[in-house]
Every structure is written in C-alpha cells, then in structure tokens.
Amino acid sequence: MVSESYPGKPTLATRLQQALSHHAAGELSQAHSLYRSILEDDAKQPDALHLLGMIAHQRGDYEEAAKLILKAVQQAPDYAEAHLNLGNAFKALNNNAKAINSFRTAAHLKPDFAEAYCNIGNALIDDGDLDEALACCEKAIALNPKLGDAYNNLGNAYRLKGQFEEALSAYQNAISVEPNHANSHFNMGLTYRELGNLDAEFASYRRAIQHAPHNDIFWDALALSLEMLSFSDADADLWQDLNALISRQSIQIEPLIRPIVSAISHHPVCAEMLVLQDKCLSGSKTRSVVAALSDNLLLLRLMSSSIINDAAMERMLTQLRRAILMEHDTLVSGPDTLPFTTAMALHCFINEYVFAETKMELEAINLLGAKIDACISEGHQPDGLLILILASYRPLYTYAWAKLLAEMKWNAAVGQIIRQQVEEPLEEQKFANEVPSLTPIEDNISHAVRDQYERNPYPRWSREGVNNEPMEIEEYLRNFPTLIDIGNYTSPKEPSVLIAGCGTGQHALAAARRYNGASLTAIDLSRHSLGYAKRMSQKFGFKNITFQQADILELDDSILAFDIIECSGVLHHMADPEAGWRSLVAVLRPQGLMKVALYSEIGRHQVIRAQAMVAKHKYGVTPEGIRQCRQDIIDAAKCGDAGFTELLNFNDFYSLSGCRDLLFHVQEHRFNLLQVEKFLISLDLEFLGFEIGQPHIAEQFKEFNPTPEAWTSLQEWHTFEQQNPDAFIAMYQFWCQKKKNLSGN
C-alpha cells in the first residue's frame, strides 16, 4: 500500500475508486487527473497505469495506450485484464502478432476468460486462420453464452469462409443475447449483400444505425446499399433515413440521387407533376404546388446540394421553374414560396442553368432583370422573391449591380443565394488571380482546353464527400481486389503527391485526405478552375495542397519530383497523350506510383454516337446550343432510342459544364487496353491493376478468368471488355509503377 504524505489524505483505494467512477461515467479528464495523481505517489501502481492506458486508447492514442499498459503488466505479470487490453492496443496499432500473444497470455492466466478467447478469434480472423478462429469463438461462447461479441466474431469467420447461413445464425444469436449489438446488425447486412438480398441488407444497416447513430462506417454502408435500390413507395422511416444521409457532409450524394428520386416520386404532388408532362400550370395551381413542395425537405435538400441525373425529374423542375416565372406577380414572399424558390435557385446554379428555356421565358427573364435593375438604380431594395426567380435563370454575379446585393440586408433564404451566386464567385476570382504559374502554356491544344475550362469549370461540386482516415498508399491499394500486392514497397513518411489536372479540386481534396502525411501539388491549365478549387480547399480546412497553373507538357524534372502522381481524365484531352504521360513519368521518382484514367473506346460507344450527332447538327458550343442538343437527345430517348436512353444515365449529361465535357470537348482521344499496354512498355512502367469501384465488375472478371495472373494481364482484360462493353463505361482507372533505373535506384 502507498504511504500517505499527510493525515486525512484519501487512501489510494479511495482515489482509485473515485477515478473508476469518473471513468465509468465517461468523465475522462477527471479520471485521468486522478490516475496521474496516484502515479505521482506510486509510479509503478499497475491499476493506475492500466486504466490510464485505457483512457489513451479511448482517445485514439494507441501508442501511448500500449506503452502505459505494458508498464502495468511489467509490474503485475499476472494481471489478465491488462494483458487483454494490451492486446487491444496492439491490434489498434495493426500489430496482430503481438495482439494475439497478449490475448493468449490473458487466457492462460485466466482460463475461464471468455473475452480473451473472443479476442483471439477476432485477431485470427484478420490473420486468415478461420478454422482456429471458429474454435476460439466457440470456446468463448461455451465460457459465456451471453457474450455477444463472441457470436459476432463467430459469424465473421463463417462469412469469410463463405458459409453465409451459419454466419446469419451466429449474428442472430448475438442479437438475441445483446439486442443492441450494432456490429452484428451491420455484419448481417454484409452477409445479405453476399447473398444478393439487397432489401435485407438495407434493413440490417438501418438497425445498426439505430443502435449506433454516430458510426460513420454504418452510414457509408447504408448509402452504398441504396445505390442498387428503387422504391415502390416511401414510408416515413425511409424518408427519415434519406434525409439523414443527404444531410451528412461526408456522404457522396451522386450515387444516392436515383434512389432518392425514386422515393421523392411517390410524394403525392411530385407524382402528379411527373405525369403532367409539359402542360401549363394556372396561377392557383402553381401556388399550391410550390407551397406543397416547400414542405418536401428531402427534395429541397437534394436540389440544394447536387445535380439531379433524372430526365423525368428535370422535366418536372423545368416546368415548375417556368410556371413560377410566368406567375411571379401572383406569388407572395413567405414560408409557402421561399423554401422551394430558394432550392430552385441553388439547384440551377449548380447545374449551370442547363434546363431548357422557351422564347417566352427568355423575354420574361429579360424583363425581370430590367425591373430589378431599375429598382436598384432608384436606390431601392428589390423584392427578395424576384431575386430568387432571376437567380433560377441567370447567375447573379453576371449583373453589374451584383455587388450591391451583397451590401443589402436579406432574409436567410435570399442571403444564401447571394452567398452562392455573388460572394463565392468573387472569392474564386480573387483566388484565381493569386494562383502562381508553374510553367508556361504554349501548346495550341493546351490553349484550347484551357479556354474551355475557363468558360466552363468542371465539375461544380458543393461538398467534400470524403469520410476516410489518412492511410499509407499500400493500405489504400489493398482496398481494391483487382490490384496486385506491391511487395516490399514502403510509402515515404511524407509522400510528395502531384495531382496532374486537378480541375475544380474535388479529386485533389480526396487525395489530400487519403494519404497519411502527404503534401500535394495540384496543377491545372484553367485559373478559373483553380480558383474554385482553392476556395473549396479553404472551406474544408485543407492545409497540405498547393495549387498552381501549369501545363503537364512543360513540367521540369530538374525542379519537381513526386512519390505519387494521379492523373485522372486528363491525358486523353492532350494533342499527344503519350508525350504528356512521358512528361509525368519524368517527374516521378524511381519506384514511384502513378494512377492514370483514360477513356475507353469500347466503353464510350454511346458518347461517340452522341458526339457524331453534335457534329452533324453543328450545335453551337454555347449554353443555347448545349441545351438544344440535350433536348434533342431527351426527345430521341422518349421515342425509344435505346442508345440515347443509356446516355441519360451519365451524371455529366445534367450540367452545362458536364455536358460540354461529355459531348462538346475540343480534344478527345480514346483507347483500348492493347494500346494502353504499349504505352506502359514504352514508358517503362509496370501495370499494377485496375481501381474498380464496382464490385460486380471484379466478380465478373473473376468468373471470366479465375487465375491470379489474369488480374494484371491487359490482354485478358481486353478480351473481357470486348465481351462486356460497359465494364469501363466511365474510364479505365489503373495504377502503375515506375521501374528502377539502371543504377538500381
């Protein structure tokens, strides 16, 4: 026992009990202080060391946790619980061997320690020793039939062995003994996905979230499960789930648009509007519809945050926009009108006013603009509703009086639009002017491409949509089954990364979040795009990205050198893609890694046909020309043209810059995989495999050729793509590695 330094001082046991009470209540700071005070009196006190280590573990400092708990077991070698938690710390540090050793020590010291056997089983699963894992989990259950984690780990072992019914039974047992066992609900969802039961998968993730609403992994899984679902109706719970998903900044909206639209289409007013086609709405009908949709929170959130890649929904919104403009004299600014008209203005700015316009609308919007201009010229503040309606047709920053709007006081709805359409564009222009030039731009095609993206920065996006913890590049590559193991490659502690052709920055921000300790250089031809990227990087608090204007062709290997280069969707827009690629290889360090994305000639067959239509009809590369082209494609799809119907599934079709990039680009090359293979050989690059985000493509290829060598055979993939022409409908996305130079470096 610790000797007391003064009469009346609480005993060690009393202080330890007080600390434990705070610890159990989640009052970690108070518990931490008490444990520290105990160690000031006795630096070797094992309970205080152990429990202080537990606090470190709870706070995510796993190295400190392992250090403290190791001191505890050194002082008390028979302390089974401390050995168990030492193993947990090692597991969190990805040191599975040490974790298993600590768990086994705990079980040896305490033969009836069910939790120790449970944790051994869990660690063995990670090692791939599934049979011994099953035995350990069964041992844990025999010792404690009420231990939910043991049943859950048992289910995980069965699931990985492909014994899905046994896995479901184990998870159900876990839930029977612990109804709030969120991980078991989640793992049931993973098992149902393997069985192809998408509805049950979705329901399982919903139940997992009910028990653990702050678990980001569960939310990500729910979002992923939704991508393949559509709904015949929409109950209140589903609407609640969808609203929660779309409100999470870490969730990517694009994959969720179709299931959300599927649910929204069952809203009574939306259902009515979707069948009206192009019929005109009366003033009273317009008011009632706008009022009803102002209460549709899911629709408003979707409109405010993303393009909507659905032709029927676009037709409905186009019709409503027209009705609001034509009937604006009958509308009154208020809670029945502002929510929907605000969402409409936000949405049209996001899609860059891609909706079709009639001659009547053009005349009306010109009159409305003149009316607002006259009002401001006379020193008056215009009606906020009129500002919203104008902003649904034209970006406010294009008007000479736009800056004056920012100086006026507005309600929250109009203020949101002023921020989006006046203040943010001004910020982007400021950032664009400040971006340094890394290289000159001398190539004629580079000039043409730059000019395109100066006029139409691509893509326009509003949320980060990234929810991953930073990781080493090796760990990231292991997420894709189509990528080979890169052997003894070890990522530098502070890798230097080049994003070659960063556009508006979405790709750069994802990479900056992804790579542990990385510093990024993001380059692009377009200052307008870089200004957008810079604003978004500041919005989301990124400090490790440098944006510079540069041409890939002009990169200088005497100044720059990178460990990782990502070049997505850029090389095929150059006059000579191989020359651009060679320039990138020159600034890649030996054994450096490169991700490349190129258009597929086979996968792009629908786009090629539409591009031929653009050339034939000579649509102008103007907003009016792009809108007319889109309308002709939509009309052809409505008449049963299957090829154009497929084109309506492309997200890029639903924004002005996206459609220009898709169908009107000034320069485009397409390739097949045999050509890609020749490039790799010529550039002395080793193909590492495809980054495929659609699991069914990987599964199809595995059925096509199950041999491990096939994953890196571009000959095999070429044959596969010929049989599955939509396998790379977006682009080829693959990783390669620069080979060692002759000196062996």
Image: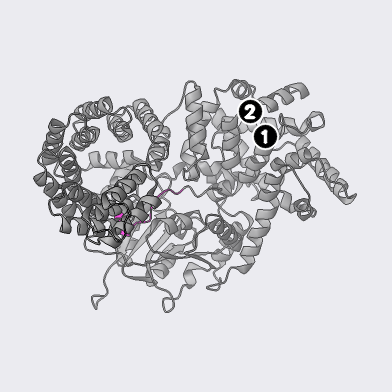
Rendered location of residue 510, percent (x, y)? 45, 54
Q: Which residues are magenta?
A: 466-477
Q: Is residue 521 above or below residue 389?
A: below
> Horizontal and vertical percent for residue 116?
16, 42
For image coordinates 62% across by 44% down, the residue present is 617
Q: Quadrant of the C terminus?
A: bottom left
Depth check: 227 or 365 in front? 227
* Gap between marks 2 and 1 measured at Cα: 8 Å
User: Sequence-wise, which precedes: disc 2 or disc 1?
Assistant: 2
Which circle marks residue 103 in the picture? none
> Which of the colour schemes (rainbow, by chain, secondary structure, one colour) is used?
one colour
- Which residue in the structure is indicated by mark 2? 295
Q: Are marks 2 and 1 in contact (CB under 8 Å)?
A: yes
Q: Is residue 294 left or right of residue 513?
A: right
Give yes or no for residue 475 being in the magenta stretch. Answer: yes
Q: Secondary structure at mark 1?
A: helix
The dot on residue 339 is 1
Q: Secondary structure at mark 2?
A: loop
Q: Amino acid at mark 2?
A: Asp
In-image side of 681 versus 550 (left or right): left
Name which residue lies at 73% across and 30% down: 323
For residue 60, say whether it is visible. no
Seen in the picture, residue 235 relative to 566 is either above or below; the reply is above
- Residue 694 is drawn in which quadrant? top left
